[in-house]
Image (cartoon, helix red, strand yellow):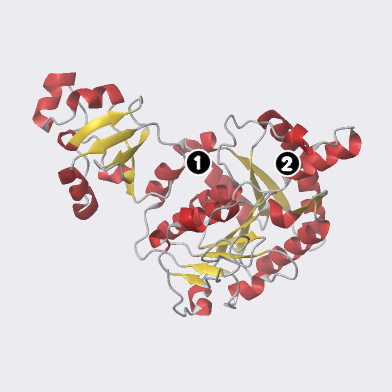
């Protein structure tokens, strides 16, 4: 954590592609969509487009818009009727059309075309589908279209697959090769404590090393309308930092000014990127699926992974947790239970349980011919993953 002055203008001078995420707390009121906020957002993004920037908008608000429509047309006035997952997904199915209709009209007033892009984690974790989604987004941006992204809530089978649009926004950074993430929120940036419960909370204009923050201790609450809260925004910013992308967490309420943010004015909180960015492939493999289990390693293996950039060999494995197949994403933990990172395993949990602690020349005798000596290859591993 630091308050060291940073030349924002110089840092952001070369930005050409931006992911902007806007949350429900900005776009909605207790009655549904906030038309004023939506139209101002469209005007702001259109202005960035006129400056030559490619912009992808990750937008919440579909569930709130659907609730609004249902309440207008039916006798369902009690908000509790939307608490269960099927009701929220049904509300999203209704609200997506309303939300996109309003966006279409708002952007059309500035001569811009929009495109709806609905994503699911299960779709993006398949590398071929991921690359196909990337090609589609590239073509839309080439045409000067503003892609408006949301999770495909209606068909998601978990609650919800990405969990929040902050996470989805971070995923889009790798998808389109963005060089800035702007997260519009209801707060005036990040504070060192929750300002709703701590009157002495101080704003943080700049976070230089987000990996050093205890974001769970800092963030002890969520907004009532959205699903993420500041915790998910900082987690998304940490993922962006690993990809080498800076994040600006700034208020999207009232007379917010995206052009001023790009021009370097000190608004909200700037989260600096890490000096050494991970590859887009490692970013994709670490964050497009949930780990299915864990591999616990001894001190020697933990040190080799952390300081020498080595692959994980079976000889360094002490135990295996969970049930998973070859190719699954798994946690890598030390003997104290600390998570060192995540990686794609070359062996199933059953195979690993049989070969743990063995030398590589003993593997074939135990489980038959093997293609790999490594349990997890270093090219398929991300340490310090923000999960």
- Residue at 57%, 32% (x, y): give it: 158
Callouts 2 and 1 close, C-beta under 8 Å = no
Instruction: Using residue 183 as the reference point, say whether residue 87 is left or right of it.
Output: right
Mark 2 vs mark 1, foreground winner is 2
| Dot label at residue 346 | none
Identity of the residue drawn at 60% across and 51% down: 139
* Residue located beneath label 2 in the image: 63
Residue 62 in sight in this render? yes
Indicate the secondary structure of the residue bearing disc 2.
helix
Q: Around disc 1, counting alpha carbons within 10 Å, would you say few (fewer than 14), some (14 to 19), or many (20 or more)?
A: some
Q: CA distance from mark 2 to mark 1?
A: 25 Å
Q: Position of residue 337 (x, y in %)?
A: 30, 41
Which mark is first along the chain, 1 or 2? 2
Left/right of residue 20 with respect to residue 240 in the rendered view: right
Q: Secondary structure at mark 1?
A: helix
In the rendered image, which residue does mark 1 sit on? Answer: 130
Q: Percent from the top left, x then y, of residue 125?
A: 47, 37
């Amino acid at each position: 954590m630091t308050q060291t002055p940073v030349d924002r203008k110089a840092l952001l001078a070369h930005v050409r592609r931006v992911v902007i995420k806007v949350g429900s707390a900005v776009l909605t009121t207790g009655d549904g969509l906030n038309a004023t906020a939506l139209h101002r957002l469209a005007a702001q993004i259109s202005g960035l487009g006129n400056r030559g920037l490619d912009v992808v908008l990750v937008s919440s608000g579909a569930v709130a818009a659907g609730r609004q429509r249902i309440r207008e047309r039916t006798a369902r006035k009690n908000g509790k009727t939307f608490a269960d997952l099927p009701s929220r997904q049904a509300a999203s199915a209704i609200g997506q059309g309303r939300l996109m209709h309003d966006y279409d009209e708002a952007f059309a007033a500035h001569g811009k075309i929009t495109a709806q892009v609905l994503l699911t984690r299960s779709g993006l974790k398949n590398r071929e589908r991921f690359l196909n989604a990337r090609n589609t987004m590239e073509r839309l941006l080439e045409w000067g279209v503003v892609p408006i992204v949301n999770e495909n809530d209606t068909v998601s089978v978990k609650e919800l697959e990405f969990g929040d649009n902050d996470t989805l926004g971070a995923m889009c950074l790798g998808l389109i090769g963005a060089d800035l993430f702007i997260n519009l929120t209801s707060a005036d940036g990040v504070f060192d404590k929750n300002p709703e419960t701590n009157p002495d909370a101080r704003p943080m204009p700049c976070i230089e090393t987000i990996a050093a923050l205890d974001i769970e201790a800092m963030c002890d609450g969520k907004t009532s309308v959205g699903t993420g809260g500041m915790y998910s925004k900082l987690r998304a910013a940490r993922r962006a930092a690993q990809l080498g992308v800076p994040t600006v967490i700034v208020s999207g309420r009232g007379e917010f000014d995206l052009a001023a943010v790009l021009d370097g004015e000190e608004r909200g909180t700037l989260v600096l990127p890490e000096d050494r960015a991970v590859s887009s492939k490692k970013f994709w493999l670490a964050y497009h699926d949930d780990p299915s289990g864990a591999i616990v390693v001894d001190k020697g293996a933990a040190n080799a992974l952390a300081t020498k950039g080595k692959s994980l060999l079976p000889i360094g494995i002490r135990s295996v947790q969970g049930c998973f197949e070859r190719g699954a994403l798994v946690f890598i933990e030390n003997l104290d239970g600390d998570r060192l990172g995540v990686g794609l395993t070359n062996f199933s949990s059953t195979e690993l349980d049989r070969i743990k602690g063995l030398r590589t020349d003993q593997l074939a005798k135990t489980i038959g011919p093997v293609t790999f000596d490594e349990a997890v290859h270093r090219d398929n591993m991300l340490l310090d993953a923000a999960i």
